[in-house]
């Protein structure tokens, strides 16, 4: 079940429900798309119709950001909890290890993936990890993309974590849905978090919905334009949407 937040369809789900659905799809060898939505994603979808099509065509879009969770609660979905991408990733890995489902990691840098996999080797010692080809930077020709897709398919991966950043990873997943027989999850900065390269906000900051501010202090040069552009507009547009809904 989904509901709309500023033109984006967000799934009403939980960690157990999301993990169970992902494992069901993976065991069946289905090609599926899973995104973790925050203010940045919703506003990118609001601004770009083609990206909105990719988001709304996804099989599962979890409420990753606390502002989205609060919005859903204001819309009457009082029990909705946050389903945070980096945490969902760990829960999926734990379930995949138990089920013997093969996973793979695409994107970020070789150094970050190596550090992350070193951690996972300790935390999930029986996890089946497929060795995937390196994701080339920049635009690829159709021939290069076909070759990469075939190489990924040949590994037998069934759950594919993609870390290219929003909106690139969601666009890539949407373009490869039906071509790669795996559940593909866009996880953004999760590789860097789990590798220990980028600090995650403490739990109390996350609960207050101030993770964006914590991340801004970590990477101000990269993130300040994103937050300045998206956060105020989200607040205004969502306030208008909630008021309009209550007046119906």
Image (spheres, rainbow, N blue to C red):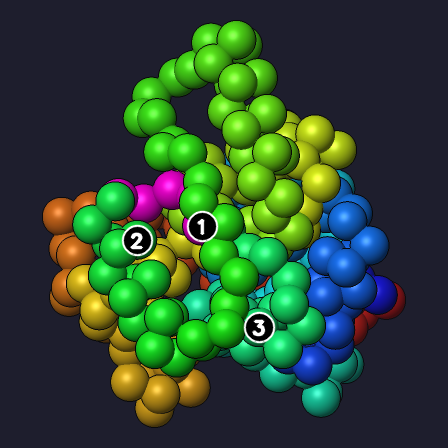
- Mark 3, residue position: 97
Main SS type for the magenta part?
strand
Question: In the rendered image, is residue 57 in sight?
Answer: yes
The picture places residue 65, in percent across and down from the top left corner, at: 49, 69
Dot 3 and dot 2 residues touching (CB under 8 Å): no
Between residues 140 and 71, which one lies in front from this camera angle? 140
Let me know if residue 33 appears in the view. Answer: no
Looking at the image, is mark 2 or mark 1 earlier in the sequence? 1
* Residue drawn where x is 71% and y is 63% of the image: 22
Residue 106 is a magenta residue? yes
Q: Which element type, helix, strand or loop, lies under badge 1?
A: strand
Residue corresponding to mark 2: 113
Percent coordinates x, y for residue 76 in the rendering:
76, 81
Above or below 225: residue 21: below
> Could you tell me how far apart the alpha carbons at marks 3 and 2 are, in whole angstroms?
18 Å
Q: Give above or below for 192 relative to 57.
A: below
Which stretch did the figure color magenta?
A: 105-109
x, y percent for residue 182: 67, 46
Q: Secondary structure at mark 3?
A: helix
- Pair 3/2: label in front: 3
Q: Quadrant of the C terminus?
A: bottom right
Q: Quadrant of the N terminus?
A: bottom right
Sequence-wise, the earlier of marks 3 and 2 is 3
Residue under label 1, please give it: 105
Dot 2 and dot 1 residues touching (CB under 8 Å): yes
CA distance separating discs 2 and 1? 8 Å
């Amino acid at each position: 079940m989904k509901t709309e937040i500023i033109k984006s369809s967000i799934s009403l789900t939980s960690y157990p429900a999301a993990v169970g659905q992902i494992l069901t799809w993976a065991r069946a060898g289905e090609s599926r798309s899973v995104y973790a939505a925050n203010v940045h994603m919703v506003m990118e979808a609001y601004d770009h119709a083609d990206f909105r099509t990719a988001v709304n065509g996804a099989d599962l879009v979890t409420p990753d950001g606390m502002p989205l969770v609060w919005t859903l609660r204001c819309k009457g979905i009082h029990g909705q909890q946050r389903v945070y991408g980096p945490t969902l990733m760990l829960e999926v890995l734990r379930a995949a290890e138990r089920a013997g489902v093969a996973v793979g990691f695409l994107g970020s840098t070789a150094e970050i993936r190596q550090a992350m996999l070193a951690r996972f080797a300790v935390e999930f010692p029986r996890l089946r990890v497929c060795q995937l080809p390196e994701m080339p930077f920049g635009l690829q020709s159709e021939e290069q993309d076909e070759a990469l897709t075939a190489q990924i398919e040949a590994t037998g991966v069934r759950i594919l974590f993609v870390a290219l950043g929003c909106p690139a990873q969601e666009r890539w997943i949407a373009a490869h849905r039906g071509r790669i027989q795996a559940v593909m999850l866009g996880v953004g900065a999760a590789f860097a978090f789990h590798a220990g390269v980028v600090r995650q906000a403490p739990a109390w900051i996350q609960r207050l919905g101030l993770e964006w501010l914590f991340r801004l202090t970590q990477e101000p040069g990269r993130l300040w334009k994103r937050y300045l552009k998206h956060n105020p507009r989200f607040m205004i547009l969502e306030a208008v949407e909630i008021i309009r809904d209550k007046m119906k």
